[in-house]
Amino acid sequence: MIDTKNLAKELNNLEEGAIFLIETDASKLLEVHLAAMKWFSEKKYTQIVLSTSRPCKNLLSLYKENGIDTSKLMILCTCCQGKENNKQKNSNVIHLPSQSALIDIAMSLSYCMERAKDKKIVFIDSINTMLIHNKPDVLAKFIHSILTKMRINNVSGLLISLEIETDKELRAEIAQLCDKIIKI
Amino acid sequence: MSVIMEKLESTLNTILKKNEVNSIMLELDTESYLETNIKTVKLLQKKGLSGVYVSIQRPFKNISSLLKKQGIESNKIIFIDVASAVSKETQEKCKECVHISPELDVDELVKAIYTSIEKMKGKKFIFIDSLTTFALHKPISETFRFSEFLMRQVKGKKDIVLILNVAKDLSHKKFIQDVVLHADKTIEVKV
């Protein structure tokens, strides 16, 4: 069990538009994901989720089970590769070809950031899965571009990564770009 | 040389008084990278320096707002917004900020730095927020050419100090070690 009160305390201290990196271990990854999503949902953020590890169908079901408002949610799904496209009734899901389709991902994120009107957060889960599908330097460059876009548009950001398993150099490249690093 | 963050001020004070050091490489903890960047600029301004902030990590809008919140006078700084350029973002015109083309041409960037620094009076600084982020967008050879050219240009000048920042976890990289060889001083800043 993660300390959700501590996580909420850390999140409460962050200003709107801040970008932070949460480092955790594999056993807590989903719990951290859901706890953070719930916190932002309660704060009425529009959440743009780049899902690299779980298909949208599974995520939506988990969000509903955990009382997360799915009406203010946009999922960029890189996992189901369109298999859920026809079955998926939720218009807030954008299907992307793969975790390595970085141009598609960047364009879709821009589209979602422009479309959402309220305070927004981009949620990237997870850096490690992205790293399986992309070279570290390519991924670091991509993350830098996305974070710049988010900062220009005053969009908050949450990146989740596994504490020990992340490539040390990639971790340093990404961590120095974030406003805060939270270890859970 | 290794200093804790609280001692950064006295270390920089000594360096600035002596006028013998023109280029300084700061090796920073990733956990406090931004905080140290801001603190360094604040110290330089406190010592009466004005300067050019080459923002590779963050767009002008973000970094200028963060510096203002920390009481840093942005009218004494000219920003060069590399982050927005490399991300191909639309760039708003602003008198405090110089924009460059998305190709990130080293010669164009150096020219922008020197055109900006010439507009300033008194003792000045050139602040490069992250060499390793620069290297994400340009080949290592170009990154080295950029830093080496700047270090050569400031050498022997009593009125300019060049600050190059890198993350400590990346300072072992070969090209960073090559830059360290050419810098007058390297300071590892610990939290």
Image: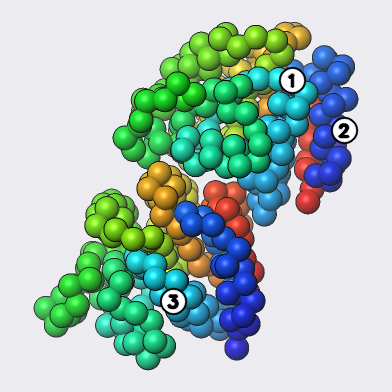
Q: Is disc 3 in the same subunit as disc 1?
A: no
Going 43% across and 17% down the picture, which residue do you hit?
Answer: B108
- What is the CA distance from the residue labelled 1 to the residue labelled 2? 15 Å
Reading the image, the residue beneath label 3 is: A42
Reading the image, the residue beneath label 2 is: B10
Q: Which of marks 3 and 2 is in front?
A: 3
Residue count near mark 1 (Cα–Cα under 10 Å), binned few <14, some 14–19, many ≥20: few
Label 1 SS: loop
Kind of residue at disc 3: Glu
Q: Is residue B163 above or below residue B116?
A: below
Going 41% across and 88% down the picture, which residue do you hit?
Answer: A66
Q: Quadrant of residue A86?
A: bottom left
Label 3 SS: helix
Q: Is residue A34 left or right of residue B13?
A: left
- What is the CA distance from the residue labelled 3 to the residue labelled 1? 46 Å
Q: What x and y, as percent, mark residue B126?
A: 63, 22
Q: Mark 3 lies on which chain?
A: A
Q: Can residue B66 be seen in this view?
A: yes
Q: Which chain carries label 2?
A: B
- What is the CA distance from the residue labelled 3 to the residue labelled 2? 46 Å
Q: Which mark is residue A164?
A: none
Q: Is disc 3 in the same subunit as disc 2?
A: no
Kind of residue at disc 2: Ser
Q: What x and y, as percent, mark residue A26?
A: 55, 79
Q: Which mark is residue B48?
A: 1
Residue count near mark 3 (Cα–Cα under 10 Å), binned few <14, some 14–19, many ≥20: few
Q: Are marks 1 and 2 in contact (CB under 8 Å)?
A: no
Between disc 1 and disc 2, whose residue precedes? Answer: 2
The residue lying toward the viewer, choosing from B115 and A8, is A8
Q: Can residue A62 be seen in this view?
A: no
